Structures are given as structure tokens and as C-alpha cells.
Image (spheres, rainbow, N blue to C red):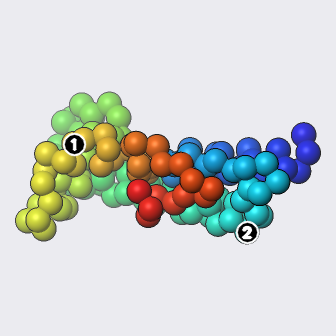
């Protein structure tokens, strides 16, 4: 692999984590600073997602007995319940929180944005 292929691989990983599609033309693609920014953003999202997951499990254990907390098999359901409780009364529609487009394991843009280097903010 040459350095360009390694950078493209890193950009593709970051794009996957952030929920967008990076389309880079030959010889006019993303530069190292843009790739580094996307990798940093992906890392921050992963850290935030781990933190919210820990908060959700702690909240669930405080809300219900231990035996009931063990009924949940995955983190997604616990995070969804935590977010519904947290956003309750703040003007958010509870039904939208359950949609995959709203919660994608730290990703946004279910429609798959594509640009030179698009960001989740541009979705």
C-alpha cells in the first residue's frame, strides 16, 4: 500500500463511523488535515457513545431492580429508553427517537451523504 491508499482507508473508516460517504476524486481528494479532522471527529463520537451507554445502564439500574435490568440484551434499547426519559418534556417526539435514522450507534445521515468530504452537520 502506498500512503495515499492508507489515507483513503482511514478516511473511509472515519466516514463509516460518522455515517457519511467520502467521495474523493483522483489527485484532488481530501488532504491530510481533512482526514485527521474526520478521524478526530469519529474518535470523539465513539467516546461520547461509550459514555452515554454507561450513563444509560447506570440510570436503568437506579430505575429498576437488578433482575429486571438483566432483561435487556443490547445497549441500543437501554440507550433509547434513557434518551426518551432524558428528553421527556423538552419538546422531542418520543416516536422519532425509536427510528433508526435518529439513533444509529453514533452515526447520522441514514440517506448516505456524498461529497468531497461531507460532514454529518451537512446532512
Question: Quick one: SS at disc 1?
Answer: loop
Q: Position of residue 78 (x, y in %)?
A: 27, 44
From the viewer's perspective, tell me whether residue 33 is left or right of residue 115: right
Give the camera-side residue of 39 and 68. Answer: 39
Which residue is identified by label 1? 98
Q: Residue at x 82, y 54 (%)?
A: 27
Sequence-wise first label, 2 or 1 = 2
Q: Residue at x 35, y 35 (%)?
A: 74
Question: Is any atom of residue 115 visible in this view?
Answer: yes
Q: Quadrant of residue 90?
A: bottom left
Where residue 75 is drawn, which disc sits there?
Answer: none
Give the camera-side residue of 51 and 1. Answer: 1
Q: Quick check: 31 above or below 7?
A: below
Crowding at dot 2, Cα within 10 Å, few <14 / some 14-19 / many 20+, comes out as: few
Q: Quick check: 72 above or below 50?
A: above
From the viewer's perspective, tell me whether residue 35 is left or right of residue 106: right
Amino acid at each position: 500500500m502506498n500512503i495515499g491508499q492508507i489515507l483513503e482507508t482511514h478516511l473511509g473508516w472515519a466516514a463509516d463511523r460518522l455515517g457519511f460517504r467520502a467521495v474523493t476524486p483522483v489527485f484532488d481528494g481530501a488532504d491530510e488535515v481533512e482526514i485527521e479532522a474526520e478521524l478526530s471527529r469519529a474518535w470523539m463520537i465513539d467516546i461520547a457513545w461509550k459514555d452515554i451507554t454507561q450513563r444509560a445502564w447506570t440510570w436503568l439500574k437506579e430505575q429498576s431492580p437488578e433482575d429486571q435490568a438483566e432483561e435487556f440484551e443490547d445497549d441500543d434499547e437501554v440507550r433509547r429508553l434513557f434518551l426518551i426519559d432524558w428528553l421527556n418534556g423538552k419538546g422531542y417526539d418520543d416516536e422519532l427517537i425509536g427510528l433508526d435514522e435518529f439513533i444509529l450507534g453514533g452515526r447520522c445521515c441514514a440517506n448516505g451523504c456524498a461529497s468531497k468530504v461531507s460532514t454529518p452537520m451537512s446532512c
